[in-house]
Image: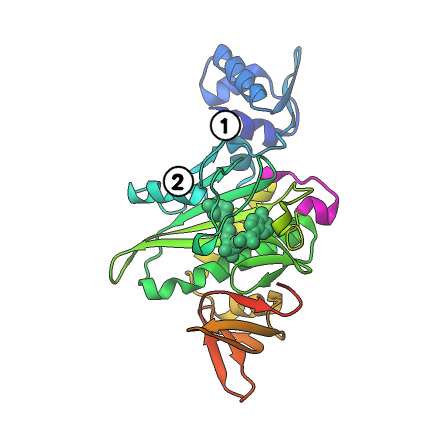
């Protein structure tokens, strides 16, 4: 009922009388009063005036389930959406939901992660309400070998959402970082559960630095936040709804494959292309010029002998970035 009241107030953009709310939702005036009180306790500004009713004046500045849902305009991603106050890792939390049969499009967000994960056992660091931790569960009908596009498509979606919503010029450092200049704004970690020939579910975990003004010493030279870049506080709930909208557009509409227009968009936003890179093969360090991204998301690197090496995972150091 709280979501319905919010939708009514948000879409009316004027006072709505208690009677009108109770009539249109088929509930008592008392129930309306109670729901409005709960919404105020959750951080929504709802003014009431005698003989006029209720007016929505503000939404919470921190992540809030009802507020994200209010702004969300997707069909699949976010159909089921939860905001947790604190969790070890949104990826671990949603993986448990996935193994219990949660539907495709389930989203879990957290205001705080106490054990946020990067790739290869690394740590993703955030403090409460500084960053957005977001995980999306999907059930693409693909073989495990076909899901390599999910990380780059997610990166493309987040990069476009950041640029559109925050008016920034972020770029993608292949395969999974969103950077501004030489610093990392977003990290993405995709995990999956699969049988031999069929994916059961994938989890895309996205960590976005929003309100940080400082970072721990070991990453302060290579990390940035939306606040540091713009000097402004963004509406985190509207921003999350924008990110989820772009994720749906890039992942679902492209049927989880990086090709055609999405591939062209990815290449044009990819900061790695055209730079000298170093990657590891076996125990050898190899350097070359990053020249393109293949269909499916591999990095193609031209070596000094003119041959092209294809890199599909692991660490790539990009000269001039990190
Ligand atoms: C990543 O790994 O960048 C993937 C990060 C994914 C985090 C999300 S948050 C929601 C979901 N739940 C999780 O538990 N995880 C996902 P990787 O490419 O391995 O980069 C990790 C490295 O980035 C670390 O070793 C640090 O050097 C650096 N780093 C850690 N925290 C950072 C931050 N807040 N901002 C910028 N860089 C950071």
- Mark 2 surroundings: few (<14), some (14-19) or many (≥20) residues within 10 A: some
Q: Nearer the viewer, residue 311 or 258?
A: 311
Reply yes or no: does residue 230 show up in magenta: yes
Q: Is mark 2 within 8 Å of ligand 1?
A: no
Please name the residue shown 62% across and 29% down the image.
59
Task: Let me know if residue 197 is in the magenta part.
Answer: no
- Can you identify the residue that label 2 sits on? 93
Asked if residue 76 can be seen in this view, the reply is no
According to the picture, the residue beneath numbered tag 1 turns out to be 4
User: Which residue occupies the extreme bottom position in the image?
Assistant: 305
Residue visible at 61% across and 39% down in the picture? 130
Report the front residue among 187 and 222.
222
Q: Position of residue 281 (x, y in %)?
A: 44, 74
| Residue 92 shown left or right of residue 84 in the figure | left
Mark toward the start of the polypeptide (1 vs 2):
1
Q: Is mark 1 within 8 Å of ligand 1?
A: no
**Mark 1 or mark 2, which is nearer to you?**
2
Q: Which residues are magenta?
A: 226-237
Q: Position of residue 23 (x, y in %)?
A: 49, 18
Q: Position of residue 5 (x, y in %)?
A: 53, 25
């Amino acid at each position: 009922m709280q979501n319905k009241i919010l939708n009514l107030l948000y879409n009316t953009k004027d006072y709505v009388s208690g009677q009108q709310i109770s009539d249109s939702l088929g509930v008592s005036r008392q129930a309306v009063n109670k729901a409005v009180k709960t919404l105020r306790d959750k951080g929504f500004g709802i003014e009431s005036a005698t003989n006029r009713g209720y007016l929505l004046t503000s939404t919470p500045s921190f992540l809030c389930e009802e507020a994200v849902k209010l702004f969300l305009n997707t069909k699949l991603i976010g159909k089921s959406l939860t905001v947790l106050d604190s969790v070890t890792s949104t990826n671990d939390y949603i993986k448990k939901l996935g193994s219990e049969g949660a539907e495709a499009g389930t989203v879990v967000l957290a205001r705080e992660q106490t054990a946020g994960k990067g790739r290869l056992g690394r740590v993703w660091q955030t403090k409460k309400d500084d960053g957005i931790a977001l995980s999306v569960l999907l059930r693409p009908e693909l073989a495990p070998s076909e899901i390599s596009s999910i990380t780059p498509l997610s990166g493309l979606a987040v990069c476009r959402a950041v640029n559109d919503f925050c008016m920034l010029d972020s770029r993608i450092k292949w395969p999974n970082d969103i950077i501004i200049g030489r610093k990392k704004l977003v990290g993405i970690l995709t995990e999956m559960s699969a049988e031999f020939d069929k994916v059961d579910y994938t989890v895309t975990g996205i960590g976005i630095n929003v309100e940080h003004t400082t970072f721990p010493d070991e990453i302060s030279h290579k990390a940035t936040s939306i606040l540091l870049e713009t000097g402004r506080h963004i509406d985190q709930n509207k921003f999350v709804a924008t990110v989820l909208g772009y994720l749906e557009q890039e992942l679902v509409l492209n049927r989880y494959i990086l090709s055609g227009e999405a591939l062209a968009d990815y290449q044009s936003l990819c900061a790695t292309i055209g730079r000298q890179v170093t990657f590891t093969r076996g125990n050898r360090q190899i350097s070359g010029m990053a020249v393109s991204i293949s269909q499916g998301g591999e990095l193609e690197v031209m070596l000094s002998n003119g041959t092209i090496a294809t890199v599909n995972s692991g660490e790539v150091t990009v000269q001039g970035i990190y």
